[in-house]
């Protein structure tokens, strides 16, 4: 065997081990997501997660530094999968009418609410964490929630014609987000039973988004600085043009 072929063989072996490691790490994350969704952090064990992933019992410590580090990564990944920062930033980019950006934001969220992601482990893990926060929520807040919040607050601030730190901006953000969060975390079958005419499914996603855009713009117009309020209502009553 020549020296060159020997080097190539060693490099190929290293790449193979790296690929195997990346696969194992990803499998652990998926298995952990399912276990945490079913049992919560307190009742989950690294042993069960490793078994579900088909990995060595020590692999959780090796790849994530322990079950705590794995849980933090699951929280961050879950939030990213529901709505990524990149998707939000794309909606907010450019010089488009801020009303159109709001439409893009709401349509993005409604696609998640009415799509397969709403029944994934990501939603169930985050629901557990929000209802009973653990010390590990800080990683989620810093890496996912705060950067996305800055984007949304900036848009709502622009729509209202008020400073980003104004209390009305925070209240308006909650008012816009709350129905989306409710539809995301609530059981689909229960929502359909309680509100049979709502249409919170993929077939009616656009109609639901249209309604929420119109409702949000009406509320923002009522709260906005007078100059911003005129802009919000200048598109007339046909919200589909926005």
Image (cartoon, helix red, strand yellow):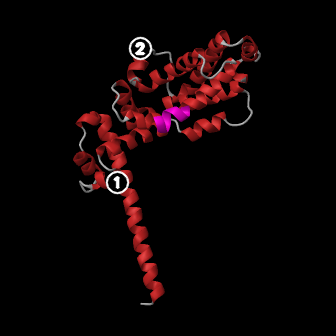
Cα–Cα gap, marks 1 and 2: 44 Å
In the rendered image of this protein, does residue 151 appear above or below residue 193? Answer: below
In the rendered image of this protein, does residue 26 appear above or below residue 2? Answer: above
Q: Position of residue 22 (x, y in %)?
A: 40, 58
The residue identified by callout 2 is 194
Numbered disc 2: secondary structure: helix
Q: Position of residue 109 (x, y in %)?
A: 54, 30
Q: Is residue 146 magenta?
A: yes
Numbered disc 1: secondary structure: helix
Residue at image location 70% in from the left, 13% down from the top: 225
Q: Position of residue 60 (x, y in %)?
A: 29, 51
| Magenta-highlighted residues | 142-148
Q: Is residue 116 visible?
A: no
Residue at image location 60% in from the left, 18% down from the top: 169
Residue 240 is left or right of residue 30, and the answer is right
- Crowdedness near tag 1: few (<14), some (14–19) or many (≥20) residues, C-alpha within 10 Å: some
Residue 5 is left or right of residue 166, and the answer is left
Q: Quadrant of residue 221?
A: top right
Q: Nearer the viewer, residue 52 or 232?
A: 232
Residue at image location 36% in from the left, 34% down from the top: 125
């Amino acid at each position: 065997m020549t020296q060159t072929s020997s080097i190539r063989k060693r490099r190929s072996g290293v790449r193979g081990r790296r690929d195997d490691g990346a696969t194992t790490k990803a499998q652990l994350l998926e298995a952990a997501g399912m276990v945490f969704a079913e049992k919560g952090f307190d009742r989950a064990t690294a042993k069960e997660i490793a078994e579900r992933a088909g990995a060595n019992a020590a692999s959780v410590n090796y790849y994530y530094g322990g079950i705590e580090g794995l849980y933090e990564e699951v929280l961050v990944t879950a939030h990213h999968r529901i709505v990524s920062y990149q998707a939000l930033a794309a909606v907010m980019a450019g010089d488009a009418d801020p009303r159109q950006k709001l439409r893009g934001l709401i349509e993005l969220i409604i696609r998640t609410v009415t799509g397969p992601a709403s029944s994934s482990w990501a939603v169930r893990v985050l629901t557990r964490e929000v209802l009973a926060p653990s010390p590990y929520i800080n990683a989620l807040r810093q890496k996912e929630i705060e950067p996305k919040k800055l984007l949304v607050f900036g848009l709502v601030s622009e729509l209202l014609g008020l400073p980003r730190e104004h209390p009305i901006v925070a209240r308006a953000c909650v008012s816009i987000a709350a129905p989306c969060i409710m539809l995301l975390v609530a059981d689909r079958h229960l929502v359909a039973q309680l509100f049979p005419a709502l249409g919170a499914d993929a077939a009616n996603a656009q109609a639901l988004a249209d309604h929420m855009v119109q409702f949000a713009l009406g509320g923002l117009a009522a709260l906005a600085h007078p100059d911003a309020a005129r802009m919000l209502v200048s598109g007339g009553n046909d919200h589909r043009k926005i």
